[in-house]
Amino acid sequence: MTEADRPHRISVVVPVYQGERTLRPLVDELLPWTRPSTSPAGHPFVVEEVLLVFDHGPDGSAQVIRELVAAHPVVRAVWLSRNFGQHPATLAGMASTGGEWIVTLDEDGQHDPAAIGDLLDTALERGASVVYAQPSNPAPHGLARNTASRGAKWLVAKALAGDAAPSYQSYRLVLGEVGRSVAAYAGNGVYLDVALGWIAGEVATCPVALREEGGRRSGYSYRTLLSHFWRMVLSSGTKGLRLVSVLGAVFAVFGVLLAFYILAARLFFDANTGSGAQGWTSTVVIVLLSTGAILFSLGIIAEYVGVNVNMAMGKPPYLIVSDPHAGPLGRAGRGGAGRGPVPDVR
């Protein structure tokens, strides 16, 4: 077999939070690709491992992962010490891979594994180290969420990141050495796609149709999505701090214009414009606006300081452990009379 005929080895990483009902169908869809296959453009590839990263969700995902690992040699489990969130869980999975390429996809069945070959074709055609799935159809969410998501990604990619980065998607293909390097150096609170953008060479997109989620409620509330967006802002560099300067300049200009307006009104229209009684409302408005701007600016600065403090103290973005069910925690109750069976750790 020549080098050109050797299949591209792909590791698939799936962060798992609420996958009790969707993991088995997803793994069943991935299994055919664990045999040597050919992409639409004729490139040979094989999925050599499927890593399920348990992020301590509220359902029975842990037991499902154990059963899938026992049933399929290609499936591996990555256990985290506690719930860290989707991006840290994805980083933990990427750090544990050994493939030439890494594919990350969601647990809910929204991402079709059949598109892996298309992502690979795009990477090889464009010479890209990162390829994002670009939805060719509206995401299966509400109009408000879809609009907010597009706006947030545009703001980060264009306004804050300052480049022509594509819209981020959790369905992505990453060159293995790039993904593992990012997982090794990314600090606490870093947004995965922003970190990839720091080192990736060519970044491309590939049209992929999204499917309906697998009969389960989304794990993202609007509060979680807002926190997700704020982490993107903080990870995108120091341009968020420039907003503080811009805000100060805007209020300075506003104050000068307001001063000219009051002076002109007093000289040419009403001699009593500047009196205490009539100026009370404008004074209150100015104080409230100024105070709000100051507190908003301090909040942004405090968030940046908090991120740096966490990193300086060595707070890890994730921690990989052994299966709690197989360790000392799994032996709880075995030696005590009257105790029930060992529960699954979730």
Image (tube, rainbow, N blue to C red):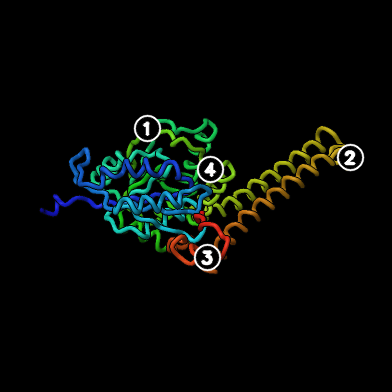
Q: In the rendering, which numbered label is found on residue 136?
A: 1
Task: Name above or below for residue 53 compared with residue 150.
Answer: below
Of the numbered discs 3 and 1, the one sitting upstream in the chain is 1
Residue 204: image quadrant is: top left
Residue 66 in sight:
yes
How far across and down, in percent of the image, does residue 149 sit? 50, 39
Q: In the rendering, which numbered label is found on residue 220?
A: 4
How far across and down, in percent of the image, does residue 345 sit? 51, 56
Real-space CA distance between mark 2 and mark 1, rounded to the nearest whole angstrom: 60 Å
Of the numbered discs 4 and 1, the one sitting upstream in the chain is 1
Real-space CA distance between mark 4 and mark 1, rounded to the nearest whole angstrom: 22 Å
Check contact, mark 2 vs mark 1: CB within 8 A: no
Q: Which residue is mark 2?
A: 277
Mark 3 neighbour density, 10 Å: few (under 14) some (14–19) many (20 or more): some
Give SS at disc 3: loop
* Residue for point 27% across, 49% down: 47
Real-space CA distance between mark 4 and mark 3, rounded to the nearest whole angstrom: 24 Å
Task: Name above or below for residue 223 compared with residue 79.
Answer: above
| Residue at the farthest bottom position | 313
Real-space CA distance between mark 2 and mark 4, rounded to the nearest whole angstrom: 50 Å
Closer mark to the observer between disc 2 and disc 4: 4
Q: Which residue is mark 3?
A: 315
Real-space CA distance between mark 3 and mark 1, rounded to the nearest whole angstrom: 38 Å
What residue type is disc 4 on? Answer: Tyr
Mark 1 neighbour density, 10 Å: few (under 14) some (14–19) many (20 or more): few
Closer mark to the observer between disc 4 and disc 1: 4
Give SS at disc 1: loop
